[in-house]
Amino acid sequence: MQGVCPHGLLLCAPRSHRVKHRLTSMSVNSKRTLLSVFALLATIAAGLIAGSPAAHAAAEHTVTFVNASTEKIWVGSTVNYDESVNFSRLPILDPGQSATIVIPENSYPNHWRGKFFARQRCAGNSGSTFHCQVGDCGNAADHCAINFEQNASLAEFNFDPSDPWGAPWYNVSYVNAVSLPITITPSGSPPPAPGSQYCAEAGCAKPLLNACPQAYLTRDAQGQPLLCTNPNRDAVTDYSQAIKAACPRAYSWSKHDTEPGNQVMYNCKECSGFTVTFHGNGATPPPTTPPTNPPTTPDPGTAKEIVSDWNGKCVDVPNGQYSDRIRLTMWDCWNGPMQKFTFAADGSIRIGGKCVDVADASTADGGWVQLYTCNGTGAQKWAISGAGDIVNIGSNKCLDIGGWNGANGAPLNIWTCNGFANQKWHRV
């Protein structure tokens, strides 16, 4: 196991408990035992697939994130410096929400090794003033704009179709710090044998901040525990001992996997994907159900711009044409009359004597958002959730910038609410 990078250099290799090189620090007997076990498992589970030219064309794995905490989280990721490609878009989840991504294993460089974490207590405008108290990785709300390892709880993965030892590998790491407790659960695989680390759940759902030595505990403005920071990631400390006792199925220091009988490293060649659950630190978690998007009517009767949290542009009526079936678009905000919308008391959004409408009362993803003569139907009823979604009542879908098009003139549609930044809005 290596220590931290000297002088904080970002280009040196990530810490050495990367799963691909796990065997290097073990004894010869341990290596022989693991090699025998992994070879047997690979033979049974994969047959001749590993030697097949089609190995890289296998179905890509999924990762589903579940927010079982009591606060909003912004999922972040970092990648190893092995040409793994970081994500340009990740979910933003209210309590109880979940979202799924696909791991890019079949595109260059044909592997993905990295870490996921929950960013907490975030605020500001994406692309400019956005930052987080925990897991801060740049000014983008829907992805990490900078790539460096975080002082936060980490879900670590090695997805490599050519890995001979049975990838994907996975583990939960509290080597740097504990924020929200994490569990990683494989899906689409046989149930694990009792006591096995093959296809078993990693991590713990316990409120781990309760175990943090007070000297390393950071509290929020209300005095509640927020983060527990490891004073020395490369040595056994009272931090590592306390975290290991509370959660033996996660790393508590960088060489934890060299300790006899440790339970920190997992792999599951047969699985189709994983569920990464971010748990709370004491409060009862909410049920995992879709958001209800409770309606509110901010500033009824006041005409204001509707601004995208993602790119800072405004919803716009093209060329000021207030006619039926004029599709709404995005444009640079300029304080003009064709960008001033009124949220009426009846739930409609109005401009130029027309109502914002879902074309033909569509409930399908991609349905056009247009102007139309006000008629009081569900296609013209909207609500703003506390998370910044503008939700169409008739379809229960969100106002969305189609295809993440950041250009002037990008059309608007409805889409299944997913928490991504191209569905987040505010009013000036």
Image (cartoon, rainbow, N blue to C red):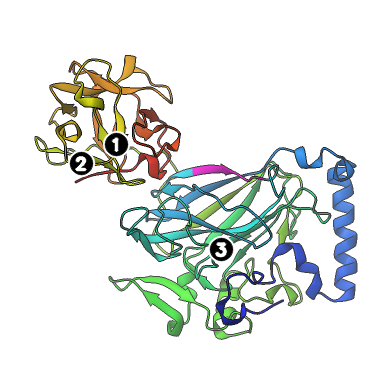
Q: Quick one: SS at disc 1?
A: strand
* Label pair 3/2, CB-CB below 8 angstroms: no
Task: Give above or below for 403 relative to 208.
Answer: above
Name which residue type carries label 3.
Leu
Task: Give whichever of discs 3 and 2 has the lower sequence position.
Answer: 3
* Label pair 1/2, CB-CB below 8 angstroms: yes
Task: Give above or below for 94 relative to 30.
Answer: above
- Which SS does the magenta portion mostly show? strand
Span of residues in magenta: 99-104
Name which residue type carries label 1.
Trp
Residue hosting label 3: 154
Say which of marks 3 and 1 sits in front. Answer: 1
**Foreground of the two, 271 or 85:** 85
Q: Quick one: SS at disc 2?
A: loop
Residue 155: where, in percent of width, then height?
A: 58, 59
**Foreground of the two, 247 or 271:** 271
Sort mark 1 into few (<14), some (14-19) or many (20+) by Cα contacts within 10 Å: many
Q: Which mark is residue 334?
A: 2
Residue lying at 37% horizontally and 56% vertically, measured from the top left: 71
Q: CA distance from mark 3 to mark 1?
A: 38 Å
Residue lying at 69% horizontally and 47% vertically, measured from the top left: 108
Task: Give above or below for 25 relative to 43.
Answer: below
**Foreground of the two, 40 or 23:** 23
103 in the magenta segment: yes
Q: CA distance from mark 3 to mark 2?
A: 42 Å
Residue 99: where, in percent of width, then height?
A: 50, 43
Residue 138 figure quarter: bottom left
Q: Which mark is residue 331?
A: 1
